[in-house]
Every structure is written in structure tokens, then in C-alpha cells.
Image: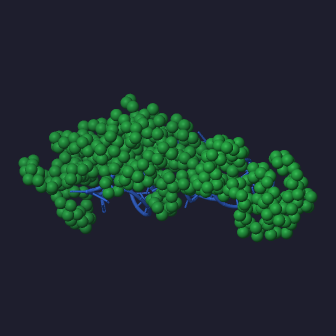
Chain colours: A green, B blue
Amino acid sequence: MSQVRVRFAPSPTGELHLGGARTAIYNWAFARNNDGVFMLRIEDTDPERSTPENTAQILRSMRWLGLDWDEGPEIGGAFGPYFQTERFDNYVAALEKLKDNGSVYPCFCTPDELTAKREAARKTGGYSGYDRTCRTLSLEDARRRIDAGEPHVWRLAIPLDQEDITINDLVHGETVFPLTALDDYIVARTDGTPTYNFAASVDDTDMQITHVIRGDDHMSNTPKQALTIQALGAPLPQYAHLPMIWGPDGKKLSKRHGATSVEAYRDEGIVPEALLNYLALLGWSLDGETTVIDADTLTENFSMDRISKNPAIFDTAKLEWLNGVYLRDMEPAEFAPYMVEALAKEGLSDVGDYEQRTEWFHELAPLVNERIKLTTEIVPMIGFLFVDEVQIDESARAKVLDKEGAREAVAAAREALADIEWDLPSIESALQALPAQLDAKPRLVFQPLRVALTGTTISPPLFESMLLLGKEKTLKRLDATL
RNA sequence: GGCCCGUUCGUCUAGCGGUUUAGGACACCGCCCUCUCAAGGCGGAGGUCACGGGUUCGAAUCCCGUACGGGCUACCA
């Protein structure tokens, strides 16, 4: 068995979205599982919509997810170039080959004529592709018209002596396509540029791709490409078509559903391990039980026969739950950079600060990572530690500080804390005595303190928060509310 | 219109003819823990396996049909 070679072939007409990311993940996991080659190929033949910015964004997203490619942009490889716009020589050569062996024919029908024919046929109910007018042209006629400079495209001549073509799809199983329903599709446009189906066929052949793993939406393209590859005299790759990912309403994922790109999720506080995990399990399963899976386990166990056939609805709630799992699982040193980044964005801290009091940050980390699901929740949770004076939230003030007994609790705490050593056991024993002393429920004593110190009703544990805030600021804030 | 694909709790899925009173996870509800919020523990509700026929002693699992959803049907990718 020759080496497995797969490709992820995005079109840089937009950002890397969730569907593309999952396709990339499956290609990558399959390659890694088989000690094969994972290639990245940029399909930028549409000059109108392709941009270098999109390409850069796609590469960035891939790296962020941890999907390293063995051949492709920025690293090269033996089968390059990896941008379709740089592979025109290959398409020309392939077209020449097909001309030589009679698999293609020139077509002089104009776009207007084609549209008219199509509409007429549709009206009477039975359109099934180009009517093959130019296919019957004699070689001499065609030659003469080409030499006369008449504009023409080249079309693939679908075999007429063959009933159908069977694709053994690794996800869907044997799929039979009747050839009568297949179009003599355009391979090269009037201007000589290749169309998508042709370019993809030529590239997959030239790059010796063994498995084409892509979205379901390409299923109908497969027979065309297979016929093209056969005409090229090359062996067919194996095909695996992945079901689509839908939005919450069961419709195609789009802007209407909010975030759809990988980077948008990053910006909303999702961690790469979580997105990789979630996407990997959206359409593939290890055993039906496993919901948390790391990249190594994924690549060690990935197999095509466990890819599901039906489309999946993207569920943000589950992604966020998973994200929380990964966040909670992080060691302080792993989580701290997320804190620093989030705080730095608000101008509350920076890397220098982190380097200066690493231990302090590492004590803080476990207090926050176990109570959030998104990294965007970091600042609201611990921002109070990084400001001189805290802004008391109005509803928290009304709900807690203005309640009966609140002032007394703050005053008692102020007094109890005034002369103690500033360590956790001391703070704890000083404050734990208060409820009994004031004859009040613990929460009625502690919530006012929380609001006074943090400005909100939600925060890391009180005693630890005080310890990390420092004695001076703690007492100052208690005084301020009194 | 033609061709192709899909259909198991709200969602992601397990299930490949009997071990299934259809299992797990998220979400939801209740209780416990508790200085808030989480996390955690325990428990609960939720599926006529799209529908209709067959095949079989026996079907979510195999076959056929129907319905619904989706894709392709461009000198887009």
C-alpha cells in the first residue's frame, strides 16, 4: 500500500469557517493516523473573490487549531506549487493530453445560446445538461474554426458507451451515478483558464492524492472528476464525503447564526483544544461514550468508518461546556497567559506584570479557571484585583449593600481584619467568626464584603480574593463603603 | 424537472438481525454541598428509532416505496 496523501483545499474567498475547519481536522487526523501526508492546497482560481488576506487568515486558523501540514503554503514540498493560480502549466498540459486522446472537444456555443437552450429545456421539464451540439462537429470543422480564432471552450466528452459510474465512497458506501444525467462539463473556459472540477482533478492526480476527504456538497461533482481523472489515465483516489454542519435552525450555517469562523470563536473565548475536540466529534465518534478527546487520542483512533452520514447541527452550548472542561483542566502556567492576554486587552496588566509576580498569578489561576466557560469571562471575574478603586455595580449595591445589617457586617469585618497577619488562615479565622458574632447567616455577612471588595455579587472565593487583593486595598475598600 | 445523499431523546451520538425495558454526552428539572458564581455528587424527565409495506421465528438494524430535508444541475468553487 502506497503512502496515504490527503489534501485540504480551501478557497480563499472567505475566512476558515467551521465546516472547513472540520474537513481540515478529518483530513489531518486521517493522515496522522496512517502516517501519511497532510497537504494544504489553496484553490484561488477565482480572482474576484480570492484574497491574500483570506489565505493568511486560513493558515493562521489552521495553526491555531494545531493542524500542521506537511506540504503546502509557506513550507513547500515536492508536489508544489500549492496555489492553483501558480499551477496553470499543469492544467494546460493536462488539457493537451485530453485533446490528444480525444477525451475533450471544443465547443463554440456562446453563453447566450447555452442559457437559451437551458431555459427552453427546463420549460419542457427535462434539462439534463448541455445538448452536445459541438460534440458531433467533425475534426476538420473544429480545427478550421479554432484556426480562424473563433472563441471556444473545451468540454469533457462523457463516455456514451457506458451506463453508469460507481464511486465507492468511504462514508456513504457504493454510490452509482447514471452517466446519462452527467453533463459534458466545461473543462477550460474561453480564456483558457480551468474550471474548478478540472483543476481539482488535475491537481489531485498530479499531487498523487490517495484520499479525497471533503464536504458532502461535492458528492455530485465526484463522477465528473472521476471521469476526468480516468481520461487522464490516472488511478482514482478514494472518496469520503462528509456531511454538512448546520446552524441551530437546521439551515446551512451562515452569518445569520452569528459566529461561523474559527477566529470568531477564538475571539469569543474558545480555546483551540476545545474547538478541535468539539468539531472532531461533530460527525465522528470514538465509541459513542467519549465526549472529551485530545488531539493525540483523535489521531491514534481516527477512522473513516465511524464518520456519520447525516448532517449535524452546531450546538454552541456544548462547545462552551467543553471549553469549560479544558479551561478547568489547565495548570496555572497554562491558564495564566489567557488571563494576561485578556487583562492586557483592557490595559489592566501585561506580560511584564506577569513575569514580576508569576506566583501571585498562579495562585489566582485556579480560582478563576474553574468557574468560567469562556476566556472572555476572565476580566469580569478578576478585574477588581487590578484597579485602584472598584466601581460598585448599582444593582449589587441595592440588592446587598443597602440591605439591613450589611453595614454592620462590613464594619465588623473591617475591625476583625485590622490587626491580623495577611495570610489565608488568619483571614479565614477572623471572618469565619463573624456570623456567630453578629448572629446572622453567613451569606448575609459575606455578600456585603464581596460587593465592597469586588463591586459585584459574583467573584472568586472571598478569603482568597482578599489575600490576593492585599491588606491595604482590602481595608481601603471596606472603609470606602462605610 | 433530472441525478445524488440523508432521517435514533431539543442537540451531538452509540447501535451494524436476538445481549435493548434503545446506552452516553450537552441542555433542562430536583436534591445535596456551599461565603457568591461555578465545579462536583446523587436523582429525574425526555425517543411510537420519519412513515408505510415487506423479508425473518425475531428489525432501529436487511429490502422496496412514500414523505420531509439537503446537495448538484454556471465559461463559481
- Is residue A119 rendered to the left or right of residue A369? left
Kindly identify the residue that appears in the image at 69 percent across and 54 percent down. Answer: A386
Kindly identify the residue that appears in the image at 75 percent across and 50 percent down. Answer: A468
Above/below status of A7 relative to A12: above
- How many numbered marks, from 0 up? 0
Say which quadrant the C terminus of chain A sits in.
bottom right
- Is residue A71 rendered to the left or right of residue A344? left
**Residue A402 visible in the snapshot:** yes
- In the depicted view, which residue is nearer to us: B56 or B5? B5
Q: Position of residue A215 (x, y in %)?
A: 41, 49
Q: Position of residue A396 (x, y in %)?
A: 74, 66
Kindly identify the residue that appears in the image at 88 percent across and 60 percent down. Answer: A412
- In the depicted view, which residue is nearer to us: A256 or A288? A256
- Is residue A39 rendered to the left or right of residue A353? left
Above/below status of A292 relative to A389: above
- In the depicted view, which residue is nearer to us: A415 or A409? A415
**Residue A169 visible in the snapshot:** no
Q: Position of residue A41 (x, y in %)?
A: 37, 44
Q: Position of residue A276 (x, y in %)?
A: 53, 46
**Quarter of the rendering containing residue A168:** top left
Above/below status of A251 relative to A97: below
Say which quadrant the N terminus of chain A sits in.
top left
Kindly identify the residue that appears in the image at 51 percent across and 58 percent down. Answer: A259
